[in-house]
Image: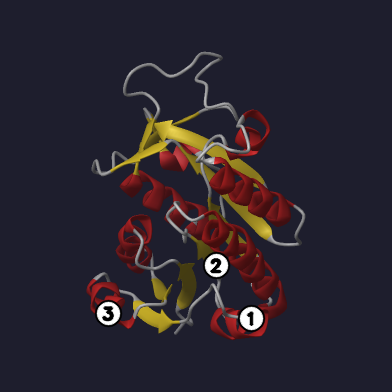
Amino acid sequence: MAEEKRVVIIGGHGKVALLAAPKFREAGYRVDSVIRNPDQKADIEEHGANPVLLDIETAVVGELAEVFRGADAVVFSAGAGGGNPARTHAVDYEAAVRTMDAAEQAGVRRYVMVSYVTADIDVDRLDEDAKMYPYAKAKHDADAHLRGSGLDYTILGPGMLTLEPATSRIRHVDREGQIDGRDPGEGEGQTSRENVAEVIVHAVAANAGVGEKINFYDGDTPIVDAIK
């Protein structure tokens, strides 16, 4: 009997992660969801995942590598949630980088990062005093570190996240979030969190989108056709 595949999700109690866990289970994966709050264990288990208690804000590379060892992929879907620039830097950049270094140390090559659509350019067009700048800077720099790593990465750049159910269909957009050279119209710049979860699972299970950043909104193209 083949050994069960395993994926580790960082930020396991986030909305996208909770949606992704049962989809990974359906795809034949064991899911280890990393959380720092023991009160969240029941939620993780209800979604078919195994809770792993570890605070990524303080965990060193070696501790993370122990969790990752033997996994088929690592998914980073954590975030500080904004509001505190120092914590945003600590979680969205510093902790993210440690997870990348830990994946390399553990020999786990496949790594999926949940970023956002305009992360590549916001750091250059936002004023440093802007409320969103610390987040944009942290995500930009984490994505850049991942691109420079030896990992088989995929960076996901969804638009404005919604709670709409999955359509399993997306549309590619450019690094400025434009659709065929134009700004999105009303309702066009959104991405269902459940669609993001489906893209994560497809990227890992089909080994799709390796070495790419995929910027996308909800659209008309089936995910399996949109991301190869």
Q: Nearer the viewer, residue 3 or 151?
A: 151
Q: Nearer the viewer, residue 114 or 6?
A: 114
Counting labels gives 3
Instruction: Please give the label number shown on residue 60.
Output: 1
Task: State which tag comes first along the sequence, 2 or 1.
Answer: 1
Instruction: Give the labeled residue for mark 2.
Output: 74
Front disc: 3 or 2 = 3
User: Is residue 55 positioned above or below 178 on the image?
Assistant: below
Disc 2 is placed on an element classified as strand
User: Identity of the amino acid at label 1?
Assistant: Val
CA separation in Å, label 2 and label 1: 16 Å
* Image coords of residue 120 (percent x, y): 64, 37
Query: Circle 3: is it few (<14), some (14-19), or many (20+) Cα within 10 Å?
Result: few
User: Identity of the amino acid at label 3?
Assistant: Asp
Query: Circle 1: is it few (<14), some (14-19), or many (20+) Cα within 10 Å?
Result: some
- The quadrant of the picture occupied by the C terminus is top right
Disc 3 is placed on an element classified as helix
Q: How is the image coloured?
A: secondary structure
Instruction: Give the labeled residue for mark 3.
Output: 39
Q: Name the residue located 58 percent from the left edge and 38 percent from the top edge.
A: 129
